[in-house]
Amino acid sequence: MLVSVLMPSYNHAPFVEAAIRSAMEQQGANFELLVIDDGSNDESPQIIKKLSEEFGFYFLARKNKGLMPTLLELASAARGKYICTLASDDVMPQNRLKIQAAYMEEHPDVPVCFGQVKRILPNGKLEEQPYAPYLSGVPEISFEELFLNNKSLHGCTELIRRAAFDSVGGYSQKFKLEDYPLWLALSNKYGNLPVLPDVFCHYRILANSKNMHRNFTLMHNQVFEIIAEYKTNALYKKAIANWKANWFSCLTYYNKKEAWQRLPQLFSFSKVFLRRLPKLFIPRMFLKG
């Protein structure tokens, strides 16, 4: 088995069939799909069960345990030389597995490779161009760039060499963020991580989303715990300042009231913060989310 596609499913009944079909329609790479429904209370289990009977992929429906336990369970069942994840509301573009698997086979020392995303907007329309923030990662991202939040990787585009995944302990159970600790660990051990220009995921933006990336307090508190694992690194204090500036920047767009409230906590005289401070006084309609 070359690639294992891991899909944790939770309450995505309107989208999960498209996600599964996009995986099962992949060509040019030997792969398996493994799906665990993590206690959905919508029609997801019934939809997935019917599709599993059609396609013959691994499927388990059980009570809710949370994302991290579900990912760990999927990873333990995976048989592939490489693993990747696919959210149950996203779509995998054609030939993704073929392109990434070929790249990894040609570069046996690379632990993981990433690519680009196009966003599926709340109206269901797919954006024509890849989402710009991740293009800066091409052709590779260093540990320093990840640590300082100077460049970002999108976790839905990864293809991970299983041996490298296991060598850094896989998904860390210490944190609720599954991907950032893993990318830091891999780049710290193996060096720069390649980022391809190809689009490997159509990433869905849900209206009134409650995704973790919108829960800035939880996400950033987790980030501070994660980077504390590297507190002996000379860049640690700078990383703290950069991530505080990022938190503040997000709040100036989504919640200016909280941005004002947290200003004393997040303020610093760093250039990266001072560049973002004017956003507090600019109406949201003029800001990029």
Image (cartoon, rainbow, N blue to C red):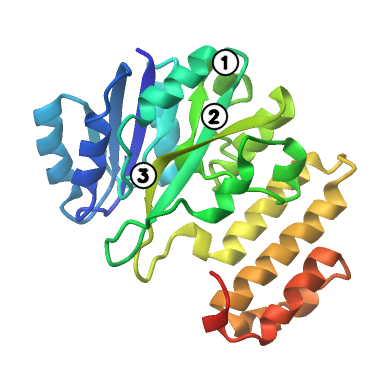
- Pointer 2 with pointer 1, Cβ within 8 A: yes
Identify the secondary structure beneath mark 1: loop
Secondary structure at badge 2 equals strand
Q: Find the distance from the CA under tag 2 to the CA under tag 1.
A: 10 Å
Quarter of the image that includes the N terminus? top left
The residue that appears at 48% across and 43% down in the rendered structure is 116
Amino acid at pointer 1? His
Q: CA distance from mark 3 to mark 2?
A: 18 Å
Q: Which quadrant of the figure has residue 189?
A: top right
Q: Which residue is mark 2?
A: 113
Label 3: few (<14), some (14–19) or many (≥20) C-alpha neighbours in 10 Å: many
First in sequence: mark 2 vs mark 1? 1
At label 2, counting other C-alpha atoms closer than 10 Å, the crowd grade (few under 14, some 14-19, many 20 or more) is: many
Mark linked to residue 63 = none
Q: Say which of 193 and 183 sits in front.
A: 193
Q: Of the residues shown, which amino acid type is indicated by label 3? A: Ala
User: Which residue lies most toward the front here?
Assistant: 128
- Residue with the mark numbered 3: 87
* Amino acid marked by disc 2: Cys
State the residue position of label 1.
Answer: 107
Q: Earlier in the sequence, mark 3 or mark 2?
A: 3
Residue 193 position within the rendered picture, expressed as x and y whole percent measured from the top left: 64, 31
Residue 19, quarter of picture: top left
Residue 7 x %, y %: 33, 37
- Give the residue at x 52% y 82%: 285
Asked if the residue at tag 2 contacts the one at tag 3, i.e. Cβ–Cβ closer than 8 Å, the answer is: no
274 lies left or right of 99: right
Q: Can residue 211 be seen by looking at this rendering? A: yes
Q: Is residue 180 left or right of residue 122?
A: right
